[in-house]
Structure formats: C-alpha cells, structure tokens
Amino acid sequence: MSNTSPFWTAYNTALKNRILPGIPLPKDNEIFPLPFTTPLTSATDPLTAEQVNYLVYNLGNTTLATDGSKGAYASDLNTYLNTVDESTLQDPAAKKKLEDAEKALSEACVAFDNVEAEAKKYYENEPPPKPPFEQWVINNYPPYTDAKRTLDSAQSVRDSAYKAYRGRLDTLHEYQEKLKKALDTTTLYQSYNMAVQKGSTSIFKPAYSSVSLKDQLNNWIQGNGQEQTLFDVKIDSGTPTSTTNGSGIYLKFITKGLGKYDVRPSQWDVPGVRTLYPDRKSGAPDVLDPKFALPLSFLVAYAPRLEVEIRDGQSTQLLPAAPAANDKPYITVLGILGQHFPAK
C-alpha cells in the first residue's frame, strides 16, 4: 500500500512501533503494510497444528517486494542452489595439493603396515604372560609410535587438502539434499518439512516455526480478547491530519487483540546463500533478487475495526458503523517485517 495520506502514515508508524519498538529499522529491512480487511483466518473452531502450519508456511515462505511482486523462498532457494557454477568452487592449485597429500598418505600407510608387521614378530616371541599388543608395542617398540605419528599427520594433511579442494562443493551438495527433503510433498522428514492442511487437503511443505502462534490464534477464535486502540487520526475539514489533540472528528483503529510473532525456516535454510555462492551458471533464473525480502516477523490483529468519534473538548460522541449481515470478528495480518536479500 503506497498511500501517503495521514491515515496510512499513522498506520505505518503504528506497525513500526509494534514490530520494532524503540529500535531503528535496519537499513536492509522493510515493513510491508497489508490490507487489514483480508483475513488470515475466519475459522470459528480451534485450529489444528496442521492448519496453523499452513498459515505459518504461507507467511514465512512468501518473499515480498515493494512493487507488490512476490516469490516463494524454498523453491527459489532450491533453484539458486541448483544453478550455482560448481566449477568456481574448486581451485586447480588445491587439487594438486590434494594429490600430493594423498600420495604422502599412501606412502605413510605402507610404511606403518611394514613397521606394525615387524613389531608383531617381536611381540610373538615375548614369553607369556604378556599385555595386549596395543599396550605392549607402545612401551617396547618406538618405531611403531613414530610410524603412527607420521600416519596421523599425513591423514590430517590429506583431510585439510580435501576440504580445501572439495569442501565447498560437498557443502553445496549437502544444502541441495536438505532442500530436496524440505520440498518433498509425500514423505515427512523431521526438521525439514511439516504436515500442513488447507481445507480438506493435507500435504507436506517446507518447515517453518512461529512460537506460540497456535495457542494465540485459538484463544482469539474462542472470543477471548481485550479491546485496545492501535492509533487514532484527526480529520479536519474532511482531510485527515496526524494531530491527535483538541476538538474535531477522529478516526480510530481498534482491535481486540494484537501480537507480534517471529517466523523462521527450519534446518533446510541456507542463510547468506548469495554471499556463499555468488557465481552462477550462465542464463540462471534471476531468483532471490535484492528487491525481495524474506519475512522475519508479522503483526497479527484480532477483530480490527475503524470507529469515528466527535470530540468537542467536553465530551466524545461515537458514530458506530452499521454492521453487515455477515460481519464477524476475524484475524488478520497487519504488516510483515522482512529482510532484503543482499546483492552478493
């Protein structure tokens, strides 16, 4: 909503104060106001965990842009990871170091096997009673200890060389496997996807979490709430102003419940993916563009409504709106705090 009228200015200010009270908005974050007339849910019966999971997934997985366009984070992340230019993740110089380290490790293995075989000959000639070979050889055959130390060092060098050459590529493949689990719609993978229900349809979707949301939604659905004014705006000669003092006509935004909830993707997420893997294949789809923001928090309201008041300094007169025949309290999302993807 790009309306810059005083009402929407007051609305946006109220969102900021509730989502980030006393904290400046970080430069890479943005608050997206949403139409408060669009219900998150109009349920009259308590929601199941699967029904709440669907709401959380829908909120957390929908990336937002100021121009109104939207994306789907999990599938966009999957596309991004599968179009990384893997050739940029391996250094030819690191490959040579790995080859040298593997050769040295092989030689160390052969040398150790020879020393161990020689040590066992001496051990077999020891008269009983005698300790286990592993204990005896440490105290009685120093070349064994030296060969074992050389082998362990060669193994460590080889492991480091492997990580330098293959590590980033292997990590990418691990991320791809996690996303594959998260996007599986038929099999449950704990901590990667979750059961969701929309209407009568049940399926698995990428897992997101939002602590205590289910209990709060069901508390509101059962009619429990305490009325509060989010903000009010004075109307002067038919023109809303930001003034909230003195006589005049005021427009009040009232709810019966308000709560801020964080939302986070589960173990399949790859934070900072554009920085980790800046190089992609030629012609790769433009996903996770910096114009999009990943939701971090959302402000939920129960039974929002507008009221008009006439104030003359001595008294206040409420002008109630005539309710529609099917007018019932509903739960809605007033705004979402999102963090934009970095350029690289």
Image (cartoon, rainbow, N blue to C red):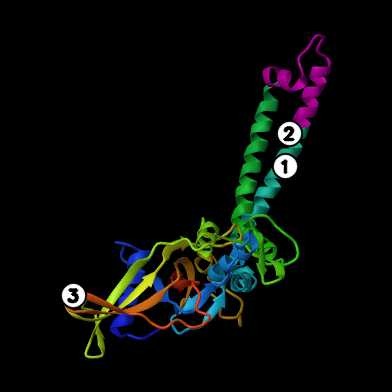
Which of the two labelled residues, at mark 1 and mark 3, occupies the earlier sequence position? Answer: 1
Asked whether the viewer can see residue 344, the reply is no
Identify the secondary structure beneath mark 1: helix
Q: Amino acid at mark 3?
A: Asn
Part of the protein shown in magenta? 114-140
Whole-Å distance between the Cαs marked 1 and 3? 86 Å
Q: Which residue is mark 1?
A: 107
Identify the secondary structure beneath mark 2: helix
Relative horizontal placement of residue 25, taking residue 132 as reference (left or right): left
Q: Residues within 10 Å of mark 2 (few under 14, many from 20)?
A: many
> Residue 324 location, x and y as percent?
48, 83
Q: Residues within 10 Å of mark 3 (few under 14, many from 20)?
A: few
> Height in image: 96 above or below 118?
below
Q: Which residue is mark 2?
A: 112
Mark nearer the viewer, 1 or 3: 3
Q: Residues within 10 Å of mark 1 (few under 14, many from 20)?
A: some
Which of the two labelled residues, at mark 3 and mark 2, occupies the earlier sequence position? Answer: 2
Which of the two residues, 22 or 290, is positioned nearer the viewer here? Answer: 22
Relative horizontal placement of residue 309, taking residue 90 as reference (left or right): left
Instruction: Place residue 24 in its image quadrant.
Output: bottom left
> Height in image: 220 above or below 84?
above
Query: Residue 304's mark?
Result: none
Which of the two labelled residues, at mark 2 and mark 1, occupies the earlier sequence position? Answer: 1
Mark 2 and mark 1 in contact? Answer it, CB < 8 Å: no
> Height in image: 201 above or below 260?
below
Q: Amino acid at mark 2?
A: Phe
- Which residue is located at x 79 percent, y 18 percent? 123
Whole-Å distance between the Cαs marked 3 and 2? 88 Å
> Residue 335 location, x and y as percent?
43, 72
